[in-house]
Image (cartoon, rainbow, N blue to C red):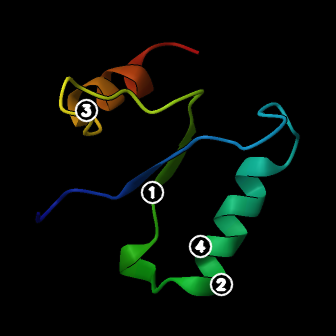
Amino acid sequence: MLGQRPVTYVVPAADPGRPGLADALRAACEAELPRPKRPAESCLVPELPVGATGKVSRRRLRELAAAPA
């Protein structure tokens, strides 16, 4: 949608507190994606929230990202 910016939600496979993970993600996106498709922000989450049907709940993801760290 016009005016919206892409955001990534990443579930780290191991060691979520690893220093430099966000920088590594940003560098990989810069190397592989054109500028308009690069995420404006990357959020590290312990797991993706899913609804009753098994689909990822985008509303709950936004709430998770907006919660203070």
- Point out residue 54 in the picture as x, y percentages from the top left corner: 27, 34
Give the quadrant of the N terminus. bottom left
What separation in Å lies between label 1 and label 3 (alpha carbons)? 20 Å
Q: Is residue 61 left or right of residue 20?
A: left
Q: Residue furthest left?
A: 1
Provide the residue designation for mark 3.
57
For marks 2 and 1 on the same chain, the one whose residue lies earlier in the sequence:
2
What separation in Å lies between label 4 and label 1 (alpha carbons)? 10 Å
- Judging depth in this view, the residue of 66 and 55 nearest the camera is 55
Q: Mark 4–mark 1 contact, CB under 8 Å?
A: no
Q: Mark 4–mark 2 contact, CB under 8 Å?
A: yes
Tell me where residue 5 sits by quadrant: bottom left
Q: Is residue 9 left or right of residue 17?
A: left
What separation in Å lies between label 3 and label 4 (alpha carbons)? 24 Å
Residue 8 position (above or below residue 34): above
- Label 3: few (<14), some or many (≥20) within 10 Å? some
For marks 4 and 1 on the same chain, the one whose residue lies earlier in the sequence:
4
